[in-house]
Image (cartoon, helix red, strand yellow):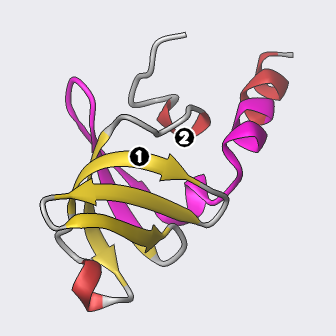
């Protein structure tokens, strides 16, 4: 299945370009780069200044597909495998 704005939250985010639009940690606002790792609560983004870990909760991210898609971090604050299970449940 192709990644689209409507189903982005159910896919693995590794490899996507991302930007932190908002975070409760002001030093993370504006971080931009490629998602290189994802856990239940964190995204690791490779930026110009190295690897930065950003909490999913209390953050707002923009992912760049064919068009920019902004997603609240709490919507993706699950294990990648758990999000895949959610898409399989949706199809039933």
Residue 8 circle label: none
Give the farthest residue toward the left.
Answer: 48
Picture layout, residue 3 above or below residue 24: above
User: In which quadrant of the rendered image does the C terminus lie?
Assistant: top right
Side (left or right) of 13 relative to 41: left
Q: Residue at x 77, y 25 (%)?
A: 90
Picture layout, residue 9 above or below residue 48: above
Q: Residue at x 29, y 75 (%)?
A: 22
Residue 85 x/y as whole percent = 80, 32
The one of 47 and 1 positioned closer to us in this rendering: 47
Q: Secondary structure at mark 2?
A: helix
Q: Residue at x 20, y 58 (%)?
A: 47
User: In which quadrant of the rendered image does the N terminus lie?
Assistant: top right
Picture layout, residue 52 above or below residue 91: below
Give the farthest residue toward the top.
Answer: 1
According to the picture, the residue beneath numbered tag 2 turns out to be: 9
Residue 36 circle label: 1
The crowd level at tag 1 (other Cα within 10 Å; few <14, some 14-19, many 20+) is some
Examine the image and state in which quarter residue 67 appears: top left
Q: Secondary structure at mark 1?
A: strand
Q: Per the image, is 61 magenta?
A: yes
Residue 5 x/y as whole percent = 39, 31
Side (left or right) of 17 relative to 37: left
- Residues drawn in magenta: 60-85
- Separation of disc 1 and disc 2 at Cα? 16 Å
Q: Residue at x 62, y 56 (%)?
A: 39
The one of 75 and 82 positioned closer to us in this rendering: 82
Residue 79 x/y as whole percent = 71, 50
Mark 1 or 2 closer to N-term?
Answer: 2
The crowd level at tag 2 (other Cα within 10 Å; few <14, some 14-19, many 20+) is many
Which circle, 1 or 2, is nearer the viewer? 1
């Amino acid at each position: 299945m192709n990644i689209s704005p409507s189903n982005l939250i159910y896919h693995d985010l590794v490899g996507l370009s991302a930007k932190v639009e908002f975070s409760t940690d002001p030093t993370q606002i504006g971080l931009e780069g490629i998602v290189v790792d994802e856990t239940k609560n964190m995204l690791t983004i490779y930026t110009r200044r190295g690897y930065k870990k950003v909490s999913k909760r209390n953050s707002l991210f923009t992912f760049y597909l064919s068009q920019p898609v902004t997603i609240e971090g709490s919507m993706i604050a699950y294990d990648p495998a758990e999000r895949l299970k959610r898409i399989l449940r949706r199809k039933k």
